[in-house]
Amino acid sequence: MWRGRGQALSGGSELGDLLGRYGRRMPLNPGDKAPALKLTDQAGNTVQLKDFQGQKVFIFFYPKADTPGCTTQACGMRDVLGDIGEIVVLGVSPDLPAKQAKFDEKYGLGFPLLSDEDHALAEAYGVWGEKSMYGKKYMGIVRSAFLIDESGRIAEAWLKVSPKDTPANLLKTLA
C-alpha cells in the first residue's frame, strides 16, 4: 500500500500497484534487480551501474538542473555526503552534460550528474510520467529516489518525493 508522498515503499507489490507511463505496472519492487544504466556524466565520462558492483548506490531523479526544487534536492544530497559512508550518489535528469556541469560547478555538488536526455533510464525506473502545471499536462521526470543494495537490487524506493525529503529519507533508512 502506498503510504504517502515521499515515504519509502518497502515490500511486496507496493510499487507494482502504481501505474507507469503506458498503463503498465511499475517495473520496480524492492528486491527487484535495478535496471542497468549507461549514461554520460557532467564531465563527459560514461557511468554504468555495474561500475559500482558491491557498493550501495543512491540514485535520485530530478526534473531540471539549476531550478529551485532541484537545487534544494541536489544541495541536500551534497550536504549529507559525509553522513552516508561509502554510498555512491548519482543524480539523473534529462539535461545535457554541459548543463549538468554548470549546475555542479555552481553548487560544488561533488557527485556524478547523469544525462538521461532520451529519458530511457527514467522510463526503466518508472519515473517518467504525466505531470501538470497551470492546467497544462506534459511528460517529465517524477521526482523520485532509489537505494540499490550491494547486489544490484532495489532496497528502497521513494516516489513523488519532495526535494527537501530526499536526503532525510536516505538518512532515516540508514539509521
Image: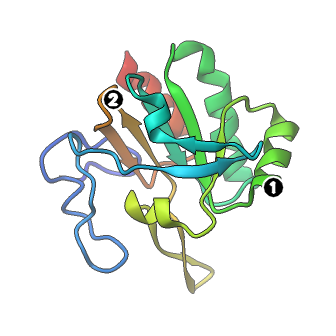
Q: Residue at x 55, y 14 (%)?
A: 83
Relative to residue 39, is residue 58 drawn left or right?
left
The answer to whether residue 50 of the structure is visible from this angle is yes
Q: Residue at x 37, y 15 (%)?
A: 175
Q: CA distance from mark 1 to mark 2?
A: 29 Å
Crowding at mark 1 (Cα within 10 Å: few <14, some 14-19, many 20+): some
Q: Residue at x 37, y 35 (%)?
A: 148
Relative to residue 133, is residue 153 drawn left or right?
left
Position of residue 122 measured from the top left corner of the image (x, y, whole percent): 47, 61
| Mark sitting earlier along the chain (1/2) | 1
Q: In what element is the residue under mark 1?
A: helix
The residue most toward the left is 12
Q: Amino acid at mark 2?
A: Asp
Q: Residue at x 46, y 40 (%)?
A: 49
Tell me the number on the disc at residue 47. Answer: none
The residue under label 1 is: 99
Position of residue 67 measured from the top left corner of the image (x, y, whole percent): 75, 55
Q: Nearer the viewer, residue 8 or 37?
A: 37
Relative to residue 158, is residue 120 drawn left or right?
right
Classify 136 as above or below 118.
Answer: below
Position of residue 19 measured from the top left corner of the image (x, y, whole percent): 27, 70
Relative to residue 36, is residue 168 drawn left or right?
right
Tell me the number on the disc at residue 149. Answer: 2
Position of residue 8 measured from the top left corner of the image (x, y, whole percent): 32, 40
Residue 107 placement: quadrant: top right
Classify 7 as above or below 26.
Answer: above
Q: Amino acid at mark 1?
A: Lys
Q: Nearer the viewer, residue 30 or 39?
A: 39
The answer to whether residue 126 of the structure is visible from this angle is no
Q: In what element is the residue under mark 2?
A: loop
